[in-house]
Image (tube, rainbow, N blue to C red):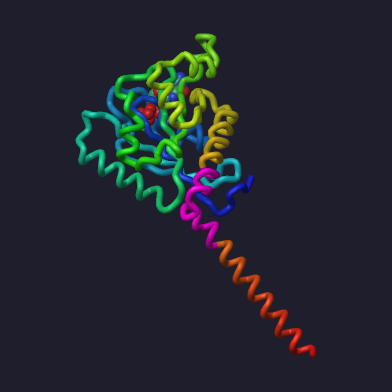
Amino acid sequence: AGRHPDTKVNLVLLGMAGTGKSASGNTIIGKKVFESKVSCNPITKECWKEEAQINGLNVRVIDTPDLFDDEIAKVAKEKHVKKCKELCESDPCVFVLVMHVSRFTDGERDVLKKLEKMFGEEVSKQTVLLFTRGNDLRQADMSFKDFLHDCQDKLKEIVAKCDNRCVLFENSNSDSDQVDKLMNMVDLVLKTLQKCDQKVFNHKLMEEQQQQSRLSEEVIKTISQMHRTR
Ligand SMILES: Nc1nc2c(ncn2[C@@H]2O[C@H](COP(=O)(O)OP(=O)(O)O)[C@@H](O)[C@H]2O)c(=O)[nH]1
Ligand SMILES: [Mg+2]
């Protein structure tokens, strides 16, 4: 706990409609905060944020509508992406790409390319893949490792581009182990972000500067006290 005390991290849930973004958001927060249900029409129509502290980290979960659907007009998508970025404020972002474990679709083949267009070239370095419906694998007596080993080449490529940051979720149970695994990966991404771009951590930098000036104040005080006692 308290690994990044001054940091708030955005977990941006992305993926096609019905993959389980909102349900995963609820599992992460530990409460039913996002609307999630079976439907042939998308349920989530706007970007939406909810905040919580998870394992000592301040987290802002951002749920999004399907931003990959080619049927949705470009202007509408751009509006959603803009709103999503606004909700993230200036805090570091980890993108959580949500996919259905037993349904990799054509629309998902170029998902990273689409993400790069929305959030920048470096997006895969900040992405964790979250597969929902873990029970489907359990029922098929397949381990997550075997699944990743046997999946389509195109999906393997996506996994490799995201440095194997994959977690398996089952949103029908509230098992906190799955959230812990996700948060460990979030932590890893944060550490790499911290290494390559200090600016993302301006909160931390600010505190360091304040500490520095507090130290110099102490030194000045001590010196002037020494002068006085002479
Ligand atoms: N069994 C099972 N159902 C899930 C899981 N994740 C999502 N669902 C169901 O899939 C449907 C769509 O989920 P939703 O969160 O609305 O998807 P979204 O469109 O990506 O936000 C809902 O009926 C969820 O209950 C999961 O891990 N296991
Ligand atoms: Mg939704």
Task: Residue at 51% x, 10% y: name it.
Answer: 139
Most common secondary structure along the magenta stretch: helix
**As rendered, which of 197 and 26 lies closer to the eye?**
197
The percent coordinates of residue 53 (x first, y second) are: 55, 45
Q: Residue at 74% of width from left, 84% of height from top?
A: 225
Counting labels gives 0
Q: What segment is highlighted magenta in the picture?
A: 190-206
Question: In this orientation, which residue lies closer to the viewer: 201 or 38?
Answer: 201
Q: Residue furthest right?
A: 230
Where's the N terminus, which quadrant?
A: top right
Q: Which of the 4 quarters of the picture holds residue 69?
A: top left
Up-down relation of residue 145 to residue 52 (above or below) = above
Whether 72 is among the magenta residues is no
* Vertical position of residue 166 compared to residue 88: above or below: above
Image location (x, y in percent) of residue 99: 41, 25
Using residue 218 as the reference point, say whether residue 108 is left or right of it: left
Q: Position of residue 152 (x, y in %)?
A: 40, 16
In the image, 182 versus 22, the foreground residue is: 182
Q: In the rendered view, does 104 fall on the left or right side of 133?
A: left
* Residue at (41% x, 24% y) in the render: 157
Query: Residue at the spot x=50%, y=32% of the render?
Result: 27
Quarter holding residue 111: top left
Instruction: Locate the C terminus and report the quarter of the image it occupies.
Output: bottom right
Q: Say whether residue 195 is magenta.
A: yes
Position of residue 43 measured from the top left corner of the image (x, y, whole percent): 32, 31
List the single residue furthest toward the top. Answer: 140
